[in-house]
Image (tube, coloured by chain):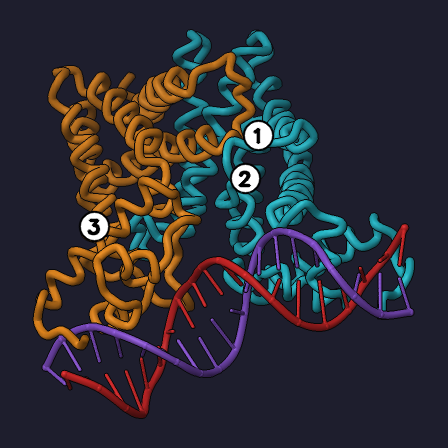
Chain colours: A cyan, B orange, C red, D purple
Amino acid sequence: MARRSDHSREQLQQMAISAAIAILNEHGVAGLSARKVAKSIGYTVGTLYLVFKNLDELLLYVNAATLDDLQRAIMQEANVHTDPAQILKTMALAYLRYAQQHSARWSLLFSHRLPANQPIPAWFEQKITSVFDGVKMPLQQLHPELNESALLQATRELWSGVHGACDLGLSDKLNLGGRFKLEELIESFVENYLFGFAKSKGIA
Amino acid sequence: MARRSDHSREQLQQMAISAAIAILNEHGVAGLSARKVAKSIGYTVGTLYLVFKNLDELLLYVNAATLDDLQRAIMQEANVHTDPAQILKTMALAYLRYAQQHSARWSLLFSHRLPANQPIPAWFEQKITSVFDGVKMPLQQLHPELNESALLQATRELWSGVHGACDLGLSDKLNLGGRFKLEELIESFVENYLFGFAKSKGIA
DNA sequence: ACCTGAACACCGTTCAAGT
DNA sequence: ACCTGAACACCGTTCAAGT
């Protein structure tokens, strides 16, 4: 064989990423492997290691794509309401819905840890910042008097709660027992946190 | 070989669980395997499948032990203060500290998902309930007027936030950038949530 | 230059065969 | 009855060899 230039390096990367996502959706995190990705794009495993340093790097790109998707899913719901508090609740529910509908990709995004002490690349951190910026905006509308650092802190606190509820809830670690809906828990959490934040700042 | 009754079924299970925890602490989640556990206790891999249905079952017991440890770590700090709000903050920081000091075990506890649609066993759910009960107590002191269901809901909301902050913070997905300490974020979150909860209930 | 194929050192899981 | 050893079907990763 040894085919030559059927696809560019960039094309191969993109094909591998798409294939990995498809496998993830169909067979879950446990069903994903470098060999299956290679087979799915019609190349040998070795070729994958010509365009990616290793499997972890491929997964990093998969997670980057998931983060982009997740942001789109959240922002899509951002402007259906005018009340900032309503917007934040809708965004939180969109986050939950994305996690439910793309559980394998969501799971990989938060369970995948880069090996050793390899730091998260700056371009990936930028994507995280971008998601937080989307949450920050309605929060700023709600509290225009806050400085940037206080606003960022509140965004992180609020989203930690939303994320934690999704993480624990979807892995059955909240013992909800079917009686309570996770949606209600998240909506109530957002309300309570926003109340508390206002009050602790003396605004109420 | 075919040694006979060197250890009982229960002893073998306990040895395997302890060995798995030791491997986890030394080599992380990626370094754990059934073969290594077997080797470490001086038996063949096959023996492991005589006392456990599969690796997932062994990991479930490992996670049960971690949950017990985690609860001890939290409850230990529960009575150093008399103010319930202070107690809750101390418990949250103990949760973070446990996650930091036992990152592999903590990671496995929340990333391990049972295969297929196999439900979490009742005895494991009971352990989760038990952890939540520890958090519920100081919250009840703070709001004795709440009924059981409202109290439980508040407990879940509060702890979702603490868990989410630990999960995102420890995997570098909060973009803290070293400026902010995760401890401060968590303390501030608990304060804000408690304020909000009180206010939304009209107590303040 | 690009890609393969085979190799290496691992996996989880099963089960006939040994004592 | 208890345990082994080998087998099966997989892994991630590397790299000499082919075109």
Question: What chain does badge 1 belong to?
Answer: A
Q: Is residue A13 left or right of residue B80?
A: right
Q: What residue type is labelled 2?
A: Leu
What residue is shown at x 48% (from left), y 45% (from top)? Answer: A111
Label drawn at residue B18: 3
Placement of A154 over or under B134, stated as above or below: above
Return the x and y of residue A174 as percentages of the image width and height: 32, 46
Q: Is mark 1 on a helix, strand or loop?
A: loop
Q: Which amino acid does label 3 sit on?
A: Ser
What residue is shown at x 55% (from left), y 18% (from top)? Answer: B177
Crowd class of label 2 (few under 14; some 14 to 19; many from 20; radius 10 Å): some
Badges 2 and 1: C-beta atoms under 8 Å apart?
A: yes
Return the x and y of residue A34 as percentages of the image width and height: 63, 59
Q: What element carries label 3?
A: helix
Distance from Cα at disc 2 to Cα at disc 1: 7 Å
Distance from Cα at disc 1 to Cα at disc 3: 31 Å
Q: Is residue B37 left or right of residue A93?
A: left
Whether labels 2 and 1 belong to a single chain: the reply is: yes
Q: Nearer the viewer, residue A10 or B26?
A: B26
Quadrant of the snapshot with the N terminus of chain A: bottom right
Whether labels 3 and 2 belong to a single chain: the reply is: no
| Residue identified by numbered label 2 | A114
